[in-house]
Image: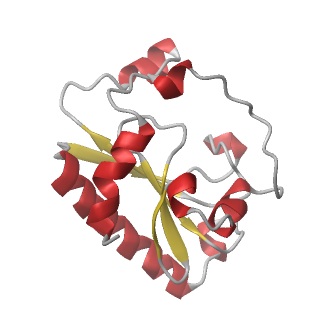
Amino acid sequence: MTYVSAEHDDAFDGPACRFCALPAMGDDDGALILTRGEHCFVIMNAYPYSTGHLMVIPYAHVDRLTDMTAEATAEMMDLTRAAQTVLTEAMGPHGFNLGMNQGSAAGAGIEDHLHLHLVPRWTGDTNFITVTGDIRVMPQGLDETYAILKPGFGA
């Protein structure tokens, strides 16, 4: 409730790409970064569709999957699998949505930096409200969810 009732400034005070800036902050807790690999990192979505909505993001500033190296692509999938395991053990979702929106026509909110969404789902959850009512229902705040998930990533 704290998050959804707070004012949010869409302007980003930093480098042109927030996905490049967040890992450079040096404050993984503040940036909601759960774990880092050599080529990619796992972060909580600051504008989640569901409690536990994570993203796997390459450090390389690329906008297409075809622009990633084979090593980075493999690590993205490995981190996605690890994140799905952590979410399953910590939160017990009934299913998952995974996806990438490449380009504004495909719905990418940040179109210049590729990212993979991992969205936990529960039978009977209210995520349809995002589509039909343009609102989001979040039963848990970002900080609380971060504290639940972070230990699963070994930190």
In the image, residue 33 above or below residue 40: above
Inspect this view and state whether residue 52 appears: no
Give the left or right position of residue 134, taking residue 12 as reference: left
Q: Which residue sits at x=29%, y=47%?
A: 96
Q: In the displayed orientation, state which residue is furthest to the bottom.
A: 71
* Up/down of 50 relative to 96, above or below: above
Task: State the residue in front, 142 or 19.
Answer: 142
Locate residue 37 relative to residue 16 in the image: left or right. Answer: left
Residue at horizontal 72%, vertical 61%? 21
Q: Nearer the viewer, residue 76 or 152?
A: 152
Query: In the visual, does 82 lie left or right of 122?
Result: right
State the count of labels. Answer: 0
Instruction: Tell me where residue 47 sits by quadrant.
Output: top right
Specify how the rendered protein is coloured.
secondary structure
Q: Position of residue 17 (x, y in %)?
A: 76, 57
- Residue drawn at 42 percent across, 42 percent down: 143
- Whether residue 114 is situated above or below residue 122 in the rendered picture: below
- Locate residue 23: give its quadrant: bottom right
Residue 86 in view, yes or no = yes
Q: Residue furthest top?
A: 133
Q: Nearer the viewer, residue 20 or 121?
A: 20
Q: Is residue 85 left or right of residue 25?
A: left
The residue at 58%/50% (across/down) is 101
In percent of width and height, residue 81 lies at 31, 68
Quadrant of the snapshot with the C terminus: bottom left
Residue 19 in the image, given as x and y percentages of width and height? 66, 59
Q: Quadrant of residue 1?
A: top left
